[in-house]
Amino acid sequence: MIRNVFNFINLHNGEEKKDKVLENVISNISFRGSNLWILACAIIIASIGLNVNSTAVIIGAMLISPLMGPIVGAGFALGTYNFSLLKKSFKNLLIATFVSLTVSSIYFYVSPFKDVQSELLSRTSPNIYDVLIAFFGGLVGVIAITRVEKGNPIPGVAIATALMPPLCTAGFGLATFNFSYFFGAFYLYTINCFFICIATFFVVKFLQYPSSIIDSKYEKRIRYGISVLIIVMIVPSFYLAYNLFNEKKFTKTAEQFVQKEFENNGYTVIYKKINYNSSPKTIDLAFLNKKFTDNEIASFNKMLSDNGLADTKLNIRQNDTDIKSEIMSEINKFDNNISEKDIAISKLRQELDTYRVSDSTLLKEIEILYPNIKNISYGKIVEYPLTDSARLQFTLVYSGTEINQEQLSNWLEKRLHEKNIRIINSDTK
């Protein structure tokens, strides 16, 4: 039974001949001629995808990228202790990296659109999850390479390990002189390359590819070196993952605070920005029509610590010009299709609400009290008396038998808490 289980999961089943696999790996390492042109085109496509925030375009660029070749070659070279192959793989990987950075930097330098989109921003802060994706993606890739029938995992590995977008993001950092973006994205690219290489190394050792050296002491030194490099690469990613966890926790707590203190009390939030990386951390809010006093704002700030938001400042934006500029800035970051028309529509809807009478039972009550009238219409209209100002007046228009308009007017004043109600019989000429 146990033997059958081991045969079922045996990685040697369906394995391609080792010399043929090595031949295929070596043939995909070199970056010359067509491979270099394909890489440059893929870099431009990925850069455009990041520039316009298009996930589909970025995925397309990853599928045609030939960057996996020298990385897998380096893994095979380490696994077989073939240092001439390792040297060749590193040389071609450096060429590919240099070309990619150059092409993406030139593109972003000449591009008129230099806004930081969400797709680009997500490649600037790698963490332990990126390590896991690169490692297990590399495992899938090298297992597929060593099979007689390759199947379809290779395109998925190219998408999952995402070598192109970090390189393009690093190019964006160079083009805009934003070196925090450059180092963050280049670290993610390094993580992906390194752990794909390490995954390849483990599979090659497990499948027992022939070694180019015999000295066991030398093998141990290489293994120790790889172990140290793994620790060096993983430790910063753990730290970044810890920061990401704290940021997500802070954001969730801030969202709950805003909902409890404002949204649940009927205040419509039209702008919200939570900044974890500032010192102190900030929560910026703006409301549709509510204005808070300085004392109220100070009181809300005192509540922050009691709600798990220590070292945080609440800013309530109440200047119309500032609010509009902030809203437009956030909209442009996440959706280029939204324009000032949407803000204008929101204002028009707000104005429309001042003319609307939102009382679903009023019409039924009038019909019960005054069964002889029909075709009832009512609402608020702007009246222009012989003064310098205008005023809203509730107006009811009906047709049918004449009724006691004064009585109806008095009832409506008390019912709607309105003054100067006007009643019009449309049948009266």
Image (spheres, grey):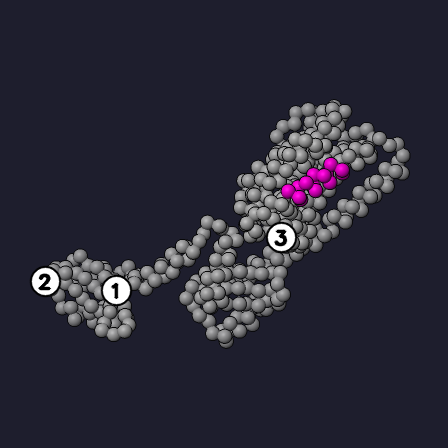
Residues tagged 1 and 3 counted as in contact (Cβ below 8 A): no
Which of the two labelled residues, at mark 3 and mark 2, occupies the earlier sequence position? 3
Q: Which amino acid type is marked by label 2?
A: Lys
Q: What residue did someone put label 3 on?
A: 176
Which of the two labelled residues, at mark 2 and mark 1, occupies the earlier sequence position? 1
Residue at (82% x, 40% y) in the render: 223
Element class at badge 1: strand
Residue at (55% x, 52% y) in the render: 115
In the rendered structure, does residue 393 fall within the stretch colored magenta? no
Residue at (86% x, 41% y) in the render: 221
In the rendered structure, does residue 92 fall within the stretch colored magenta? yes
Left or right of 285 on screen, residue 344: left
Q: Where is residue 172 in the image (x, y as percent from the top left)?
A: 62, 49
At label 3, counting other C-alpha atoms closer than 10 Å, the crowd grade (few under 14, some 14-19, many 20 or more) is some
Q: Position of residue 338 (x, y in %)?
A: 45, 52
Q: Which of marks 3 and 2 is in front?
A: 3
- What stretch of residues is rendered in magenta? 90-103
Measure how far apart labels 1 and 3 are at the Cα level: 54 Å
Q: Which amino acid type is marked by label 3?
A: Thr
Question: Residue 46: which quarter of the image?
Answer: top right
The number of discs equals 3
Residue at (62% x, 60% y) in the render: 277
Q: What residue did someone put label 2 on?
A: 429
Left or right of 227 on screen, residue 342: left
Q: What residue did someone put label 1 on?
A: 381
Instruction: Depth check: give the residue in front, 41 or 135.
Output: 41
Residues tagged 3 and 2 counted as in contact (Cβ below 8 A): no
Q: Nearer the viewer, mark 1 or mark 3?
A: 3
At label 2, counting other C-alpha atoms closer than 10 Å, the crowd grade (few under 14, some 14-19, many 20 or more) is few
Instruction: Depth check: give the residue in front, 103 or 242.
Output: 103
